[in-house]
Image (cartoon, rainbow, N blue to C red):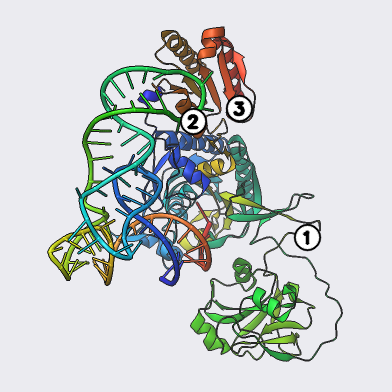
RNA sequence: CGGGGAGUAGCGCAGCCUGGCAGCGCACCUGCCUUGGGAGCAGGGGGUCGGCGGUUCAAAUCCGCCCUCCCCGACCA
């Protein structure tokens, strides 16, 4: 592609709308433009990267025996009512009516549609297993879209659904997809981890997330360097037992703490360590009030709370509710004397003595509070986030915390949707049974952003060869020079014929501009035809990442790059 | 939804407090010049100052309402 004929509006400065690096670089590199909050257009360069990811996904899905379909973006309410998700899904589901006043939504995911399709067409165990997938636009009306393509409202996703006769079949399909995902992200040239995950709104029991490792990731992963255990924060079990020093229970005492609310402030004010403080968080769990106790230096994980109580929804109580339930403003809640509220506690509190809690009274706390003597906790659960220093639940060695970007998520759904929607088949004995399902997503557009978060420097993007929009930037320094142009043209033809994708910068621009643009858009190799070529007949071949400048004859350059591209894509 | 910030040329911003010709840098067009890391000179085009209403002789500037975008939080594959 000749750059003078291409549509590549690069920006010299960071756009004001972008905060994270992938978003800034995609705007600057002329890959995307924003149309509305969380909604982006892909420009030619951005689309080429998207297509690279799609191609890899498609090839690996096909190899795994999955069959591609294309399902509608617009979906009728009736299907969602069948599974109950029309009411459950919340505002992320964008709903609207057609001219006949029928309810529709934009599909945020396609379990209902695919299950409907399959229940109508699949009758027999002989048709199983079946794995269908699509690569399509999804819409989720996120509360707060942000970070460009990382959390858009409209985005491109690959979603696959497996249908099996039994659990064993599901396990095989799940394993097949798991392996396909490893191949996909390896081929994308990304450093990633598969981690145990919670199943959230999709439902089901077993689930893994595929995380691209990046400092800027939104999610935290706990992993064990010795045994390979890896889980996201919601799943990483906090198993560490704290052995607290033997102390006699001291008398309970109310102290004045005027205006001191936050745990750190209370600890500092009273001169006790943060770990001697117990936070009391008031939650509404499926509408019922709970007081959740957690150590001052720990963080509550709401997903763990929801799972521990087997609840559908947990939400923190608002200021009015807190006041109504505890009799004190937010910041002074405590377990002592609470009625009408179920008290539960994090496991790390077992054995803790003489701690500080709120007094359910404005500007007052208790010191030397103790379990059973002063109040009773209904139960102890694992409710906190693991921290650096927690131990691996599998092998007991210390866990490491890293950040990641979720690019894939696979679930064993079981019969949740098939049972609700009557998607059944006849087994060998002629008995009717619900299909056993799995579902498997990859955020295709998010993967593009994640690749940039993981691969960039101060100059711009550094594409892995397999995702790069072009393999090579051919820079002609001095396009007025006939000799340079002839050599460049020949090189361009040679590379193209060798299967190397070339973006040829033959614009009438100064060298600096060409170098800056080439670095910004991050093509893996630069080939420079300029002064040195006039002197020596050789061109420069420079990788975008790291050192390794080579002076090669045009033929050598073609062979070198052909070799690189063939081996890495 | 709560808190904070912003909207002025394609992009980045100043001007607003204290009302009085709408500016700067980059980009764009023309010419000259230059050509190995975003050159230089000269000339030029481009604006409903987010929208609506109000105050005033006069509003980008003051007041009110609305819209949009960004950040933090809550929420979320």
Q: Measuring 63% from the left and 62% from the top, which residue is drawn there? A: A234
In the image, which disc is placed on residue A568?
A: 3
| Mark 3 nearby-residue class (10 Å; few <14, some 14–19, many ≥20) | few
- Which of labels 2 and 1 is toward the front? 2
Residue pointed to by mark 2: A516
Q: Are marks 1 and 3 in contact (CB under 8 Å)?
A: no
Above or below, comparing residue A160 to residue A559 in the picture: below
The verdict on a common chain for dots 3 and 2 is: yes
Locate residue A488, reporting x and y percent. Answer: 46, 13
Q: Nearer the viewer, residue A540 or A145?
A: A540
Locate residue A409, reporting x and y percent. Answer: 57, 51
Q: Gap between marks 1 and 3, in whole Å?
A: 38 Å
- Which of labels 3 and 2 is toward the front? 2
Residue pointed to by mark 1: A391
Locate residue A303, reporting x and y percent. Answer: 60, 66
Looking at the rendered image, the quarter that the N terminus of chain A falls into is: top left
Looking at the rendered image, the quarter that the C terminus of chain A falls into is: top right
Q: Image quadrant of residue A179? A: top right
């Amino acid at each position: 592609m000749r750059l003078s004929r291409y549509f590549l509006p690069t920006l010299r400065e960071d756009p004001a709308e972008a905060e994270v690096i992938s978003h800034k670089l995609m705007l600057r590199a002329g890959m995307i433009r924003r149309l509305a909050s969380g909604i982006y257009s892909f420009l030619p360069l951005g689309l080429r990267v998207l297509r690279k990811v799609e191609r890899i996904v498609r090839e690996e899905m096909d190899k795994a025996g999955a069959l591609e379909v294309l399902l509608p973006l617009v979906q009728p309410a009736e299907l969602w009512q069948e599974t109950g998700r029309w009411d459950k899904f919340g505002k992320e589901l964008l709903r609207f009516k057609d001219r006949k006043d029928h309810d529709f939504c934009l599909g945020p995911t396609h379990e209902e549609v695919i299950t409907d399709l399959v229940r109508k067409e699949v009758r027999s165990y002989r048709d199983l297993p079946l794995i269908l997938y699509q690569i399509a636009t999804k819409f989720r009306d996120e509360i707060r879209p942000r970070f460009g393509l990382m959390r858009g409202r409209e985005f491109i996703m690959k979603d696959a659904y497996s249908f099996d006769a039994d659990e064993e079949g599901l396990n095989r399909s799940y394993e097949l997809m798991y392996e396909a995902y490893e191949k996909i992200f390896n081929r994308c040239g990304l450093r990633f981890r598969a981690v145990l995950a919670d199943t959230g709104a999709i439902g089901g029991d077993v689930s893994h997330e595929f995380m691209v490792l990046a400092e800027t990731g939104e999610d935290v992963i706990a992993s064990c360097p010795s045994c390979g255990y890896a889980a996201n924060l919601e799943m990483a079990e906090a198993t560490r037992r704290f052995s607290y020093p033997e102390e006699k229970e001291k008398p309970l005492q109310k102290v004045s703490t005027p205006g001191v609310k936050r745990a750190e402030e209370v600890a500092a004010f009273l001169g006790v360590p943060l770990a001697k403080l117990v936070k009391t968080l008031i939650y509404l769990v499926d509408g019922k009030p709970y007081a959740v106790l957690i150590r001052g230096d720990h963080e509550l994980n709401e997903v763990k709370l929801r799972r521990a109580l087997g609840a559908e929804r947990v939400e923190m109580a608002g200021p009015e509710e807190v006041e109504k339930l505890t009799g004190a403003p937010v910041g002074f809640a405590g377990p002592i004397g609470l009625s009408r509220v179920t008290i539960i506690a994090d496991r790390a509190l077992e054995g803790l003595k003489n701690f500080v809690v709120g007094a359910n009274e404005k500007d007052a706390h208790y010191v030397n509070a103790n379990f059973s003597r002063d109040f009773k906790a209904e139960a102890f659960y694992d409710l906190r986030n693991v921290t650096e220093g927690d131990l691996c639940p599998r092998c007991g060695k210390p866990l490491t915390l890293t950040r990641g970007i979720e690019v894939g998520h696979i679930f064993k759904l079981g019969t949740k949707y098939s049972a609700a929607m009557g998607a059944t088949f006849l087994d060998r004995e002629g008995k009717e049974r619900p299909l056993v399902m799995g579902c498997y997503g990859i955020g295709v557009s998010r993967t593009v952003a994640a690749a940039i978060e993981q691969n960039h420097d101060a100059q711009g993007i550094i594409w892995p060869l397999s995702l790069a929009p072009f393999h090579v930037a051919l820079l002609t320094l001095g396009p007025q020079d006939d000799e340079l142009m002839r050599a460049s043209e020949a090189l361009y033809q040679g590379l193209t014929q060798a299967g190397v994708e070339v973006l040829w910068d033959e614009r009438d621009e100064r060298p600096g501009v060409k170098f800056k643009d080439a670095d910004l858009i991050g093509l893996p190799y630069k080939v420079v035809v300029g002064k040195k070529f006039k002197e020596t007949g050789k061109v420069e071949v420079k990788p975008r990442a790291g050192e390794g400048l080579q002076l090669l004859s045009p033929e050598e350059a073609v062979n070198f790059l052909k070799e690189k591209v063939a081996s890495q894509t």
